[in-house]
Amino acid sequence: MQDILDDTPAVAIGTLRRDDGGPGRFRTSLAEAHAHGAKLDWTTVFGAGVAPVADLPTYPFEHERYWLDAAPGAGDVTAAGLDDTGHPLLGTAAELGGGEGTLFTGVLSLRTHPWLADHAVAGTVLVPGVALVELATAAGAGLGCPAVDELTLEAPLTVPAEGAVTVQLVAGASGDTGRRPVSVYSRAAGDRGEWTRHATGTVTPAATPGPSMAPADWATVWPPPRATPVDLADSYERLALRGYDYGPIFQCLHGVWRDGDDVYAEVRLSGETRTDGFGVHPALLDAALHPVALGLTGGDAGAMRLPFAWSGVTVRSMAGVSALRVRLSPDGSGGTRISAADEQGDAVLTVGSLLLRSFSPAALTGATAGGLRRVEWTEIDRPAPGELTAAVRLVTGDSPHGLRAAAHEALAAVREWLSGPPAADRLVLVTDDGAASSAVHGLVRAAQAEHPGQFVLLHDPSGEPDAEDIAAALATGEPELALRDGAFFVPVLSAPLAGGDPVFAAEGTVLVTGGTGVLGSLVARHLVTAHGVRDLLLLSRGGPAAPGAAALAQDLTEAGAHVTIRACDVGDREALSAALSGETLSAVVHTAGLLDDAVVHSLTPDQLDAALHAKAEGAWHLHELTADQPLTAFVLFSSLAGVLGNGGQAGYAAANTALDALAARRRADGLPAVSIAWGLWADESAMTGSLDEQDRGRFARSGIVAMAATTALGLFDAALATSEPAVVAAGFDPVALRAQAAAGDLPAVLRGLVPARRTQSAADAGSLRAKLSAMPDAHQVRLLADLVRADAAAVLGHAEGTSVDAARAFRDLGFDSLTGVELRNRLAARTGLRLSPTLVFDHPTPLVLAEHLREQLAGGAPIPAEVTTPARHDEPIAVVGMACRFPGGVRTPGDLWDLVTAETDATSAFPTDRGWD
């Protein structure tokens, strides 16, 4: 029956099979009919009630698939007036009317082209630049122009994790020379928005076969006999740290050799990679460029570079080629010439010149803007409890007016812990869900950032976990956990949240605290120009006398708003009440705050109070004093410092986590609220005005990217549209985050932003000890001094450790208490030692510190140098003359060796012609 219907759109479905003719078989046939589009009345099968619930497909580790995947490009494209090209990426083509050229189209997704997932840059899946060359050569070949004269890449082509992207290649009409212009575009599948152009260039008819595509003499003997092999150990791990995320399909580099300026490479696809339809599979050609990414052809090995401009590309059709021998040579103008041959030495591809361009992850859409995120609490396995050896302090409080008391108690506990000798055990601080304990979270996170491995933060609604719970929490190795019904949860920053339409009522008066500051004035202008707000009440300590206040008022008035500026300390409840008297508010934006940086072991209660006063206590005053106001928005400007626990900002972090808790409480009570934990704004403000280049370098190393005001205000609008009570609005540099992860410095809450990588561990410290034990005393100190100088240079933002004078005081080098703690943490990770937070001030120069580290690594005694003694052999030693005048016809060393290995006895008369008898 199906044979008869083959040329029709009909399908035949049987209801009986051998040994399978029951109701189950019949229902399966109905399901097949449904899958092919038949309209069925399921009530005749299941009745009018609820259909039975089926088990979900088994989990993916069993590798059983239940979904029917359509092959890329499946379907009758000719019915739509298109030609089927048979190419995996550009499946269809259509000649444009009027002789305007030809349009090639394709749809790319991780479902239909899963191999693309193995090519990511800084965590974002990109279509490889070599794939765009493949598009151009494939399209050109179909038009009689198989060679790419030039192709310039303009924008990266990203592939979404979900959904698909439509790709177009437009080949223009042929000119007098036969050349055709080509352009590559994309947009999200199903979208009707603007197309993004990714590449432009020209394709040309194939030239007369010449030397460029002749048999590759250089590839006939392999590897090249004069070339020196290059060690590729950890090459893909090193590339990953710089942001090149090559999965197994793209890890095709099997060997590299050097011969002068030329670099040779052998690349080979895995056996599972299908090459059908490609000229050269993009994964194979991309791997041919990996020596360039590794810096083996020159250039800055530390910079991320991607293909930018191709010229003179010719591909000989080699469908099915799975391995290449590659030669990379300088082209004389800063580019790279590429030749590739198959395993028989026959030429496959030539590239006259490839230019690469430095690339920043910021060029990827959303790569550094980051979007809005939230902190999600993810359940982890509960381990068996070990021995409870840590100290425990409970810090709880129900009343929001107890913020200071709870924060003071936590600060006292932390400082007391740090004041004694370094301890092997940890201090566990337990908080409940009370409003007062919210400030403790930020303070402890800052202490953890400054003193890794010494503090654990445990949230328990009861405030009284038992010993077994605490022991199990310690066994997880996590710095922060929440305990809910016996299960443990850890905080992880989420993927960007979906956007929405911001809602901000323009009617009524909008209150902005800190309204004459940099951020407050930016927000005030934005509310007027973007949201149509016409009545503003701006409060600040300086009021109308604050710098820039008069100009701000004039600008807002000219924009059509009525502006009132008043002097008010919002942390003073009575003053705030007076400032709000008689006002009817429709919204509140609380930007006020104060920075008073200090590392936690030197933070005073007065400094902590100053940080809590305007920001945290001011927010609670606003919450209480506006309880009878018809508010549609209550926006709190929090900080990433509270989420991460910035070192040196314990008080500021404490104030910000109190804001997050207040927003959550308001939402739980049905009141509007959102707390925005801001990252770094590029605009200089009271919070960032004191940052010097060293501070900004520290932020850059931490992976936090400064956001332009336009970007930040866009995130402000997005926060207005979210249903989350607390969000994070920050820019992140994925490459810097990877470097942090590799060094073991990445905050646990950011673990979801980078793939897991090996970190420094006790094994590294053991390796250092072993290396030192093999050295004399003077060499031990020299090695440790070099380590100290290298880490000091990294902290100060210098490129090389040689820029740090080993005999110069750390203070003179530019170290303060915060950078001193950062250096201490780096050295602790390298050595495995518990080191004092005042390390760089107790041992004031790199050389003195190196001596101290040497003593600590030896447990207070000099590290014994490993003594090497000659090997002892019991066998006799024969000393022979190489003139080889021996019995048995020996005349050469080879003759002598043959005689010995054959165990032949040979005798002759004593020689009489030696000249000295």
Image (cartoon, grey):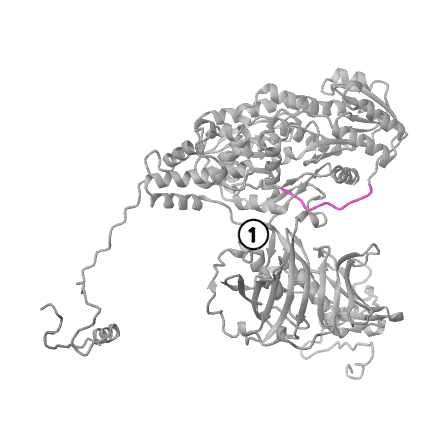
Against 243, residue 326 (above or below) is below
Q: Left or right of 122: which side holds 769?
A: left
| In magenta stretch: residue 495 | yes
Give the residues drawn in magenta, as a range: 491-501
Q: Secondary structure at mark 1?
A: loop
Residue 62 sits in quarter = bottom right
Left or right: residue 319 compared with residue 761: right
Q: Which residue is pictured at 66% across the width and 23% down the height?
A: 612
The N terminus, quarter of image: bottom right
Between 525 and 314, the one lying in front of the other is 314
The picture places residue 588, in percent across and down from the top left corner, at 79, 28
- Count of numbered tags: 1
Give x and y (percent) for residue 426.
48, 33
Say above or below: 727 vs 886.
above
Residue 586 in the image: above or below residue 774: above
Above or below for 410 versus 302: above
| Residue 628 seen in the figure | no
Q: Main secondary structure of the magenta part?
A: loop
Camera-nearest residue between 690 and 105: 690
Disc 1 designates what residue?
301
Left-right relation of 765 to 199: left
Mark 1 is surrounded, within 10 Å at the Cα level, by few (under 14), some (14 to 19) or many (20 or more) other residues, namely some
Residue 54 is drawn in which quadrant?
bottom right
Spot the residue most to the front: 915
